[in-house]
Image (spheres, rainbow, N blue to C red):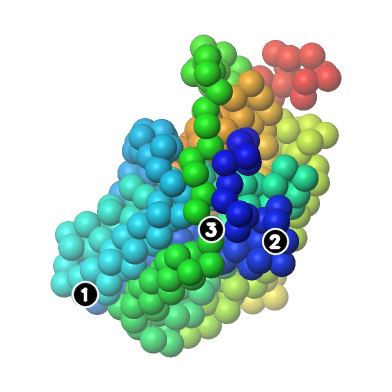
């Protein structure tokens, strides 16, 4: 990481100011990633308003995820030479305009366009935000700075859906997009005002990061992440609908149930980050087993709110723990090019998110909503089988 080119306003010279700048980055990350995941909580409301099926609405999730997967690494590389401050401001303004278009959408096609455009820019921000935080803080404090930015991302992953559900119930789904529009513009103004000019870090000559694509074990880890996220999002994409239609939770209360799911998930995020270093594959298997148990228990407990809350707690714990577990696992597997490995896991996660939304939507249409937990559990079993096969293929010290 090249910090010598930073201007005089950088963090190493002004630590209190750098703390504010990194906090702004974290909030911007929260707004951007919330834009991606919030729509899962809006699906029932927008499906009703646009007069489409819930499974058709769910394909908006697929569109966003596949756009990130297909264009993310390419666009991140193409824009790597652009100064970070201007890049982040431009991305946030794009998000503001796209959220405004979503709020004005008269049909699913306009809404799809409003989701496609920001999906192009999300991985660019996600892939460079932690790098820029390290530039702001300087090499001695880079780790803490990156952790603060990722706190905003983790909070969006956990709370984006419940916040969207609550906002849709309180303000309407269109006004929820207007709120995101305003927040995006506000964060663009904050970055423009408070962040120093940050040059794009220089790339070391002769780097051959693409060599990790010839490593079969690394590719197996990426494939495992695709399976894990497919299992997670086959059911989770439609969790709001499951709570409302299967468990009989009033629409006005669904958001609070999802908020509880997210609160427990923050604990899972911490646990996953603590245990993954010891055994990346082993922790993947353990939390996939918990995920299966939580999803199936949720289906069986729909008649009792007390048991349902317990089942959702197990599901939420496992679901959120698997985010850092997969990220660290893939980065360890591609240790010779960790930045590229991290971006590949993001692509794998979005591939799984999209495939899960497709599989779940098809299952609802063909079999019915209760089938989601069984289908997701079956995919999780496939992921466990792959993880165990990978573990057997390596010495114990590498597991």
Residue 304 visible from this viewpoint = no
Q: Which residue sits furthest front?
A: 8
Relative depth, front residue between 277 and 259: 277
Tag shown at residue 155: none
Q: Are marks 3 and 2 in contact (CB under 8 Å)?
A: no
Q: CA distance from mark 3 to mark 1?
A: 35 Å
Q: Are marks 1 and 2 in contact (CB under 8 Å)?
A: no
Q: Quadrant of residue 169?
A: bottom left
Relative depth, front residue between 283 and 75: 75
| Quadrant of the image containing the N terminus | top right
Dot 3 or dot 2, earlier in sequence: 2
Question: Is 374 situated above or below 335?
Answer: below
According to the image, label 1 marks what residue? Answer: 104
Q: Give neighbour class at mark 1: few <14, some 14-19, many 20+ (Cα, 10 Å).
A: some
Question: Is 55 situated above or below 169?
Answer: above
Q: Give neighbour class at mark 2: few <14, some 14-19, many 20+ (Cα, 10 Å).
A: few
What is the x, y in percent for residue 388? 69, 25
Dot 3 or dot 1, earlier in sequence: 1
Q: CA distance from mark 1 to mark 2?
A: 43 Å
According to the image, label 3 marks what residue? Answer: 196
Q: Residue at x 45, y 80 (%)?
A: 167
What is the x, y in percent for residue 9? 60, 58
What is the x, y in percent for residue 73? 42, 35
Dot 1 or dot 2, earlier in sequence: 2
- Secondary-structure class at tag 1: loop
Q: Are marks 3 and 1 in contact (CB under 8 Å)?
A: no
Q: Quadrant of residue 364?
A: bottom left
Give left or right: position of 136 versus 279. left
- Secondary-structure class at tag 2: loop
According to the image, label 2 marks what residue? Answer: 14
């Amino acid at each position: 990481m090249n910090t010598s080119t930073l201007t005089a306003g950088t963090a190493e010279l002004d630590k209190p100011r750098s703390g504010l700048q990194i906090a702004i980055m974290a909030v911007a990350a929260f707004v951007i990633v919330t834009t991606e995941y919030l729509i899962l909580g809006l699906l029932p409301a927008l499906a009703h308003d646009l007069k489409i099926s819930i499974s058709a609405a769910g394909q908006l999730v697929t569109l966003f995820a596949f756009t990130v997967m297909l264009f993310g690494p390419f666009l991140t590389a193409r824009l790597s030479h652009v100064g970070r401050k201007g890049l982040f401001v431009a991305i946030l303004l794009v998000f503001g305009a796209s959220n405004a278009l979503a709020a004005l959408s008269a049909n699913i096609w306009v809404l799809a366009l409003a989701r496609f455009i920001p999906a192009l820019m999300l991985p660019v921000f996600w892939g460079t935000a932690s790098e820029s935080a390290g530039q702001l803080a300087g090499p001695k404090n880079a780790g803490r700075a990156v952790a603060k930015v990722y706190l905003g991302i983790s909070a969006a992953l956990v709370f984006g859906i419940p916040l969207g559900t609550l906002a849709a119930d309180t303000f309407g789904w269109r006004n929820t997009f207007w709120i995101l529009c305003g927040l995006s513009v506000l964060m663009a103004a904050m970055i423009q005002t408070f962040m120093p000019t940050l040059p794009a870090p220089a790339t070391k000559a002769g780097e051959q990061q693409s060599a990790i694509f010839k490593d079969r074990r690394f590719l197996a880890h990426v494939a495992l992440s695709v399976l894990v996220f497919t299992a997670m999002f086959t059911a989770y994409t439609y969790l709001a609908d499951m709570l409302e239609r299967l468990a009989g939770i009033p629409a006005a209360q669904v958001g609070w149930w999802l908020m509880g799911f997210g609160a427990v998930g923050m604990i899972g995020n911490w646990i996953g980050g603590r245990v993954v270093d010891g055994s990346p594959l082993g922790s993947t298997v353990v939390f996939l087993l918990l995920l299966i148990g939580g999803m199936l228990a949720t289906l069986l407990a729909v008649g009792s709110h007390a048991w349902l809350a317990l089942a959702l707690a197990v599901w939420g714990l496992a679901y959120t723990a698997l985010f850092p577990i997969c990220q660290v696992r893939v980065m360890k597997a591609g240790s010779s090019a960790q930045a590229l490995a991290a971006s590949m896991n993001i692509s794998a996660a979005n591939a799984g998110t999209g495939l899960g939304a497709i599989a779940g939507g098809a299952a609802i249409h063909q079999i019915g909503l209760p089938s989601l937990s069984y289908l997701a559990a079956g995919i999780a079993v496939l992921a466990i089988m792959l993880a165990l096969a990978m573990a057997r293929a390596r010495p114990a010290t590498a597991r």
